[in-house]
Image: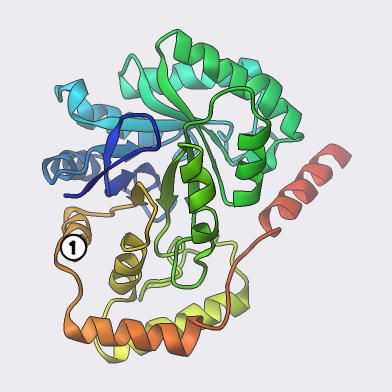
Amino acid sequence: MKYNELGATGIKVSHVSCGGAAFSNIYGVFDEQKSVDLIQETLKRGINYIETGPWYGQGSSERTIGKALKGIPRDSYYIGSKVGRYEKETAKMFDFSAEKTEVGLNNTLDLLGLDYVDLIQVHDVTFAPDMSVVLKETLPTLERAVRDGKARYIGIADYDIDVMQELVEESEVKISSILSYAKSTLFDNRLQNYTKYFKDKGIGIINAAATGMGLLTNKGPEPWHPASDDIRAVCKCASEYCKKYNVELARIATWFTLNQPGIDTNICGFWNIEQMSDTVDVMEKGLTDLEERILNEVQTRFFDKITLHWDHVELPVYKEKLNQIYKN
């Protein structure tokens, strides 16, 4: 396993890390015991960073990870969680207030059965009613949590990299890492435009969603995916092309992402032990000759001349739902 230092934290995280969204029903019905076994096997394979948050299953991810970590030496792994995004119900989905931030972190520690997390991140800051709430309430509350020993470092996580860059510039609280998702992929590799900026500031770079949250798989994305029909259609064509040659699109897409420079760790949402092993194997052994050829052809045919994204899609939808709630 390859290990990289997470910014200037001194923490050396595995290049592949374990994503906690899989330990919920976001990507299908999960089995708790199988998930516990998976997490424990993941640690045995040398993966030492686990990423979670209260949004993933409204506590099921953190609870499952907590069960898996019982009896495992605390100094043998690193774990990150989040605050800011919580419930499925639109009106209670986001809360960046100081009070909720403190309560949310305490609940996370209770579910994980831990005294502290290594990294606590503000989740989807784009959805804050105003950035001043994050700057004046969320981040200072997390800074106190660090002083109290409940967390070691503070990060931010969002789809919009510009928003994270803005927060880094404006925050009086030290931000040690950023988490970007679906922007180090075959169809959108814009994270590379920002790696030097964050690296120069000693900020760790965490990447997630190598498959674009299921778009770059032979199976295809879940119905809730925010991508437009046009984006789905392009990715579907890429997957059908891979199927013709009995190649899994997710495998070549993951290899592409794992080989992008400047990224400290790549969060992968493993569904089972076989998938985890395959991800580690493709990182360590690379692609077959056939897979390399299909990757080059998929890039040329479907993704080289266009960046596919869902910028400015989810926030307006969320605000409209809130407006409807307030009207009623």
Quarter of the figure that contains the C terminus: top right
- What residue does disc 1 label? 278
Q: Position of residue 315 (x, y in %)?
A: 71, 51
Identify the residue at image location x=57%, y=76%. Answer: 231
Mark 1 is surrounded, within 10 Å at the Cα level, by few (under 14), some (14 to 19) or many (20 or more) other residues, namely few
Side of 142 relative to 15 (left or right) = right
- Depth check: 161 or 278 in front? 161
Q: Is residue 34 left or right of residue 27?
A: left
In the picture shown, does residue 296 fall above or below 63? below
Residue type at tag 1:
Asp
* Above or below for 291 versus 244: above
Residue most extreme to the top: 148
Using the rendered view, name the quadrant where residue 134 is placed. top right
Side of 114 relative to 131 (left or right): left
On screen, residue 234 above or below 260:
below
Q: Which residue corresponds to the image point at 40% horizontal and 65% vertical from the top-left?
A: 211
Residue at the left extreme of this rendering: 44
| In this view, 150 is above or below 239 | above
Q: Can residue 92 be seen here?
A: yes
* Visible residue check, residue 90: no
Label 1 residue SS: helix
Residue 221 in percent (x, y) is at 46, 67
Residue ID at (19%, 70%) = 286
The picture places residue 205, in percent across and down from the top left corner, at 43, 45
- The residue under the point 42% across, 82% down is 299
